[in-house]
Image (cartoon, rainbow, N blue to C red):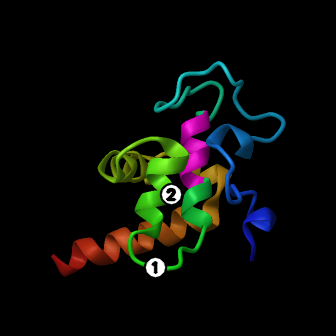
């Protein structure tokens, strides 16, 4: 499926552009999640980026830097925390469950 069908950002969009009605307000701080209001703008952008397919090595890391303005290391830290957040699972169960399976398989190989 395309990004548009998943609600993910298309080329040139910024994280705040992936929000839909009912998502957190623009003034919220990024990086954390507000337990009463749902996922932050940044959390939603991270999940949207994870729904995308990337063409080659380095493309995802480049997108993380350009679209989210953070290092790939920080991105993966946030993503890992999101995988354990029930709000992320409720928001995007297909993506979260897929990433949990991948994470669990890597842990088992170690």
User: x%, y% of residue 78?
Assistant: 40, 45
Q: Please give the name of the residue rendered at 44% of the width and 59% of the height, measured from the top-left corner.
A: 62
Going by the image, does 98 lie left or right of 37? left
Q: Please give the name of the residue rendered at 62% of the width and 55% of the height, measured from the top-left corner.
A: 48
The magenta stretch spans which residues?
A: 41-47
User: x%, y% of residue 89?
Assistant: 58, 54
* Residue at which label 1 appears: 56
Q: Please give the name of the residue rendered at 58% of the width and 33% of the height, measured from the top-left corner.
A: 40
Label 1 to label 2: alpha-carbon separation = 12 Å
Residue 56 visible within the image: yes
Q: Earlier in the sequence, mark 1 or mark 2?
A: 1
User: x%, y% of residue 94?
Assistant: 62, 68
Q: Please give the name of the residue rendered at 75% of the width and 57% of the height, measured from the top-left corner.
A: 7
Q: Kindly indicate whether the residue at mark 2 contacts the one at mark 1 (C-beta within 8 angstroms).
A: no
Is residue 46 highlighted in magenta? yes
Q: Which quarter of the figure has residue 8?
A: bottom right
Which structural element holds mark 1?
loop
The local crowd at label 1, few if under 14, some if 14 to 19, many if 20 or more residues have their Cα within 10 Å, is few
* Residue at which label 2 appears: 63
Question: Farthest top residue?
Answer: 27
């Amino acid at each position: 499926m395309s990004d548009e069908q998943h609600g993910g950002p298309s080329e040139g969009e910024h994280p705040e552009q992936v929000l839909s009605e009912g998502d957190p307000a623009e003034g919220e701080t990024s990086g954390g999640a507000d337990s009463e209001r749902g996922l932050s703008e940044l959390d939603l952008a991270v999940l949207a980026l994870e729904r995308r397919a990337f063409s080659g090595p380095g493309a995802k890391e480049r997108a993380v830097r350009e679209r989210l303005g953070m290092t790939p290391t920080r991105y993966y830290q946030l993503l890992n925390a999101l995988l354990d957040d029930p709000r992320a699972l409720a928001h995007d169960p297909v993506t979260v469950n897929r990433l949990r399976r991948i994470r669990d398989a890597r842990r088992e190989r170690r």
